[in-house]
Image (spheres, rainbow, N blue to C red):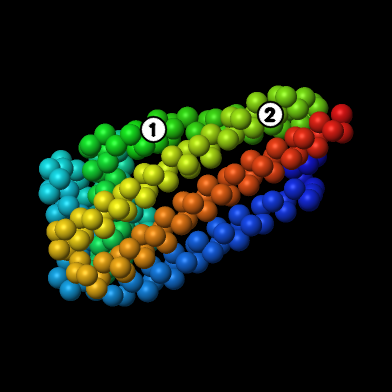
Amino acid sequence: MPFVYFDYTYIVLIPAIILALYAQIKLSSTYNKYSKIGNSRGLTGADVARMILDANGLWDVKIQHISGKLTDNYNPQTNVVSLSDSTYSSTSVAALGVAAHECGHAVQHATGYLPIKIRSALVAITPLGTKAGFILILIGLIFSTPNLALIGLALYSLIAVFQFVTLPVEFNASNRALETLRIDNILDDDELPYAKKVLSAAAMTYVAALVSSIAEIFRLLLIINNSRRRN
Ligand SMILES: [Zn+2]
């Protein structure tokens, strides 16, 4: 039972785990630092979100206040930008960066940005694909049919495709955010690099998630190959 016992294939996960930990710590520390620095215009995250949405003609996109920290998101189904406790009424440069980033997703959706369309399509099928894939891998390993396990692994790999498509969506939303914050004079030249640092740290967590998935897929491939050799 390769899933139960510790085996050497776990080693391939170690760099990915270190990267994920680093990205999480980096985001936490960067966010904490710049959530204490207020913007010179005294605008809140919600103010800025409304300004950006209106400037892009997205008057119909609603903004809501949700609980939590860094739980901010844009939902293309409901067309709502949700800003967390630490963003909605905060005047920090970090909050403004995050609010502008979420509005960037709303603009992507409104302008038909291709990667967000692909991502939205994958949102529905990815959890199903990875679950079915994992079950097929298990069955393939238990009944010594490596080819079935490989088919399962291909399905399971949808998670990495999803995370890969997420990267341009996230990077583009951050670029749009920084561009808007600059052009509309929401943040001044001293404040902009702070917002950029927060958004770059957030983007790093998406890269780390993809690397983790690739490492996990590689590990499963090793396990399947080992089982083939044993047969
Ligand atoms: Zn985002």
x, y percentage for residue 110? Answer: 22, 37
- Do the numbered discs 2 and 1 sit on residues whose CB atoms are within 8 Å? no
Query: Which residue is painted at 69% across and 51% down in the image?
Result: 12
Instruction: Write down the residue under mark 1.
Output: 118
x, y percentage for residue 222? Answer: 74, 40
Q: Is residue 225 above or below residue 8?
A: above
Q: Nearer the viewer, residue 68 or 180?
A: 180
Question: How far apart, in angstroms, are the residues tagged by discs 2 and 1?
Answer: 25 Å
In the rendered view, does 219 fall on the left or right side of 155? right
Q: Is residue 149 above or below residue 103?
A: above
x, y percentage for residue 191? Answer: 25, 71
Looking at the rendered structure, the kind of residue marked 2 is Leu
Looking at the rendered structure, the kind of residue marked 1 is Ile
In the rendered view, does 80 fall on the left or right side of 228? left
Indicate the quadrant where residue 16 lies: bottom right
- Secondary structure found at label 1: helix
- Regarding residue 9, the answer to whether it shows in the image is yes
x, y percentage for residue 111? Answer: 23, 37
Indicate the quadrant where residue 151 lies: top right
Indicate the quadrant where residue 121 lies: top left
Instruction: Write down the residue under mark 2.
Output: 150
- Secondary structure found at label 2: helix
Query: Which residue is painted at 56% across and 49% down in the image?
Result: 211
Q: Nearer the viewer, residue 196 or 140?
A: 196
Quick one: quadrant of the N terminus? top right
